[in-house]
Each structure stands twice: as C-alpha cells, then as structure tokens.
Amino acid sequence: MIASLVLSVVLGLVLLGAAAALIRRRRSNSTSGQARTAGPGAGRKVLESVALGLQAVARGRVSGGRPLPDVHTVVHSGRRLTLQLAQADLAAPSPWTPDVSGKEWSLDPADLRRTGAAGDRPAHPYSLTVTLGLHRGDRVLVDLAQLPGTIALTGDDNEVLRLAQALITEIVSGPVGHLATVVLVGSATSPPVTEGLEVRSSRLRTAADREEALAHEGGMPPGTVPAQAPAPAPAPAPAPGTPGTPGTYARRLFVVTAAQFRDERWADAPLRATDALLVLGYITDAAWHIGVNTDGSLDTGRLGVPIDTHTARLS
C-alpha cells in the first residue's frame, strides 16, 4: 500500500515536470517567433516601406507645389503604414489616404511597390525618423528633427546606452536616414558609448567639442546636388515643410553626454531648425524627456507616444 502511494506520488511529480517543461518550451518557441518577426531582416523590410512612404509624401507634395507636412509619428502595423500629423491636412498625395479628420494618412505598404515607388528614390525631409520601439506589436517611429530643443534619454545607464546605440545605428545604416548625419561629441566618442556601435558609416562622425561638431555639414549621398554651396559656418536650414531640392533635406543629430551638455553650454548652441540634439543622461532643462525603464518600456513624457518595448530590445 505504501509502495503504491509512493509510486503514485513519483509519477505525479514526473507528469508535473513534463507539463512544466512543455509549457516552457512553448513559451520559448513563441518568444523566438516574436524575435524573428521583429529581428533585423523583418525590421529592414519595415524600414524600407517607411522610407518609400516618406519619399511618396515628398514627391507628391513637392510636385504639387504644396508644403510638406510635419509628421508626429509613423506607425507600421504590418498591413498598414500610418502617418500621424502634427496638423490636420486632407491633401494626402497618392497612394496615401487621409482619414476624415486629416490628422492621419495611411496606406497598404504593398501599394508602394505596386506603384513603382521602389525604383524612384526622391529625397525626403524625414531622415531623422527612427524607431522608438513597439506598442502592442506595432512599430512606432518619430522624427527627431520635429522635436525642437533638447531630447534627454534618462533611466538605467545600460538601457539608455543600448537605446542610444540602436537609434544611432538605425539612422546611419537604415534606408530611412540616407540623408542624415550623426555626430558623436566629446565624451560620447569613447566607450561605453561607442563600444556597442557595430556600424561603420561615413555618416557617423566624431567631434572633440561643440565648436568642431557644429562645423560638420550635413551628409549627403554621392550624386546628390546641394541646393546651395555650403556656408563656412552653420546657417539656418529651410524649415521641414519647405519644398526644395534634395540638398535641403540633409539632417544632423548631435549626441552628447549630460556632463558635456552642461560643460559646453549646449543649451545655447546655434543649431539649425532641422538639427536634433540627443543627451545621454538627465538634465533639468531638456525640452523632451524619454525615460528608459528596466522592463524595456519607455516613458515618453509630453511626446505622448506609448512604447512597450524599446528598439534596442527588438533584435
């Protein structure tokens, strides 16, 4: 009787262990599937669709003599690509379709390739548009050039560095940012900032200090004709909504640490209207605070963009 009872207990424990192992394996497979979906290959295709969509905006609005819209966010949900605009605008160029409010334009990404947009690569002014992360499975991107003032990444140091490295890498190596330059300044040019950057690009540059950084002209790919000869000193660039030639769409992102920001008085730096300034660490006078949480989510503050998983955790 006792032997039977012991045997029953042992068999029960074995069955519980097997069930637990099966559950873990299913969860692991599910997680792996999600990682594959959000991995580099899938992410590259999504960014190519975003680039084509933004090029369609530039081509359609400039050819029609209309100013370019200010894009608040770009959301890719798989079968839909959506632009959320800062101001209502019903004049969406094909293949974009506005909603009834004019605050959102959307399309099926497949329409971009069916219309032949893949073979036509006009310049677009949104080359600092970069992935913040996922919200409910949708990829959410923001145009850093549309955020006037300083953008501060705060929170856990390691998570801040990982996010900054992912943003920099996407801008200088992805299809959206082909007219953007990232300049690492001062202490941001050394480890631990640079050791996580596994990208080599002529559009990723370094500068010892503020003066040298501001002397960098925006990068443009070979064959791009500048709108005008580069000025010897930084000058205000055309506003994002101004139609023009490809050269007017070069963008610069400066990356500095919080200590460098304070020491070199970057708050007073004569940035162009189309530049963006990213600070690694907390500063009191940032216009935009993005808090990086240890669970991978972001608190975007007044930017108001919900992010469940930041972009560095997608691959």
Image: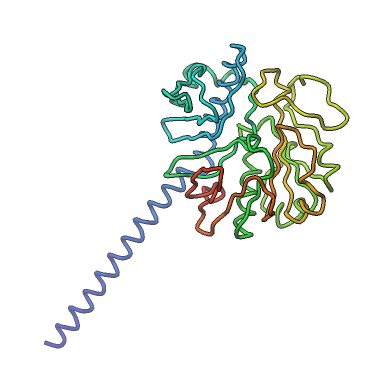
Seen from the viewer's position, the closer of residues 72 and 180 is 72
Furthest residue toward top: 64
Numbered disc total:
0
Which of the pair 182/72 is nearer the observer? 72
Residue at left offset 26%, top offset 72%? 14
Q: Quadrant of the N terminus?
A: bottom left
x and y percentages locating residue 276 in the rendered image: 69, 39
| Residue lying furthest right | 232
Residue at x 75% of width, y 33% of height: 272
The relative height of residue 44 versus residue 260 in the rendered view (above or below) is above
Can you name the residue that lies furthest to the left here?
1
The location of residue 135, given as percent across then percent down, is 46, 44
| Rendered location of residue 121, percent (x, y) | 62, 21
Q: Residue at x 54, y 19 (%)?
A: 117
In the rendered image, the vertical position of residue 204 relative to residue 106, given as above or below = below
* Residue in the image at 57% along x and 26% along y: 54
Q: Is residue 143 above or below residue 7?
A: above
Q: Does 198 sit left or right of 216 as displayed?
A: left
Specify the color scheme: rainbow
In the rendered image, residue 110, in percent from the top left (x then y), is placed at: 45, 24
